[in-house]
Amino acid sequence: MKRQRAFTLVEMIVVIAITAIVATAVAVFIRYPVEGYADTVRRAELTDVADVALRRIARDVRLALPNSLRVMSAGGVNYIEFIITQSGGRYRDPTDGSTGGNFLSFTNPAATSFDVLGSRPAMSVNDFIVVYNLGVPGADAYVGNNRAQVAAIAGNTVTLAANPFATQSPPLPSPGARFQVVPGNVRAVTYACPQAVPGNLTRHWNYGFNALQAVPAGGSQALLAQNATCDVEYQANATGRNGLLYIRLTLTAGGESVALFNQIHVDNTP
């Protein structure tokens, strides 16, 4: 007769107890390494997001129209605003010794066409040209007295919808006969970031031009980072030709925080 073999209830309980003890011991030993790995991954992800956001801001600021960057705080949020440019060139001016052609007139409001010297920079109809932006009354692109919209382009001849330069008092032509091109589908750009309470870091554009800085309304916006706070400071040097934008961006997630600091050079030479 074949003998049958099995295990008793007592043996099963002993095995379960031993397995539980071993599992508990293993969990105690691997808990902290696993938590440390998860924390490291989380910090790395936060650092990547913060780095990309600061790089995006820096890239845009370096394309800012000279003397257009301004900073304000409202409702617990820091706002960095500037007019972005896409290219620039030289306009035909009577003082450059050229003969013939269309000069950019600073005396005749009816003269709306001018010739671009050299290769025409990237520009399209509905873009804007800005001449000698100083950020002061009479030469402030936000107000519009040195900003004109492009109505037509034929070769190197640009026709403006109107000539605001001829209405400046006094006229303020560029000493180097230079102009900057502002894309009509972007215009002014604002970065908004909470000061103390973590929230969204966002980029706003194509909402128009505000004579005085304000919270952007309308236009388009994109999210750069969540659970963000920022410390922002802008300082222009004594000559007004350069400036430094200081940004300290802090991101928080899962009890972890990372803070990155960036100093962005601002070229204010018009």
Image (cartoon, helix red, strand yellow):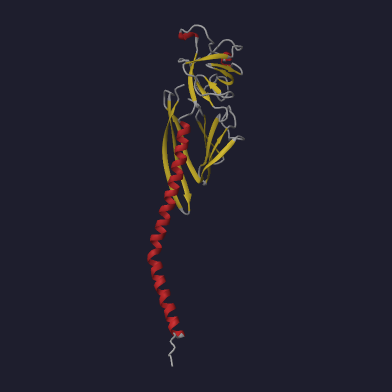
Quadrant of the image for the N terminus? bottom left
Query: In the image shown, does 10 or 192 lie closer to the viewer?
Result: 10
Name the foreground residue: 57 vs 210. Answer: 57
Residue extending furthest toward the bottom? 1
Quadrant in which residue 105 is drawn: top right
Can you tell which quarter of the image residue 204 is in?
Answer: top right
Q: Is residue 103 left or right of residue 42?
A: right
Toward the front, the furthest residue is: 1
**Residue 216, horizontal then vertical, whole percent:** 58, 35
Relative depth, front residue between 111 and 79 = 111
Q: How many marks?
A: 0
Residue 125 at what x, y percent from top left? 58, 23
From this view, report whether residue 51 is shown above or below residue 102. below
Residue occupying the point 57% across, 38% down: 221
Residue for point 59% across, 14% down: 112
Q: Report the residue at 59% width, 10% height from top.
A: 108
Q: Please name the residue shown 39% across and 61% down the image.
A: 32
**Image location of residue 69, percent across then percent down:** 50, 29
Q: Residue 163 appears at what percent x and percent y?
A: 59, 16
| Above or below, 181 relative to 76 | above
Q: Is residue 185 above or below residue 259?
A: above
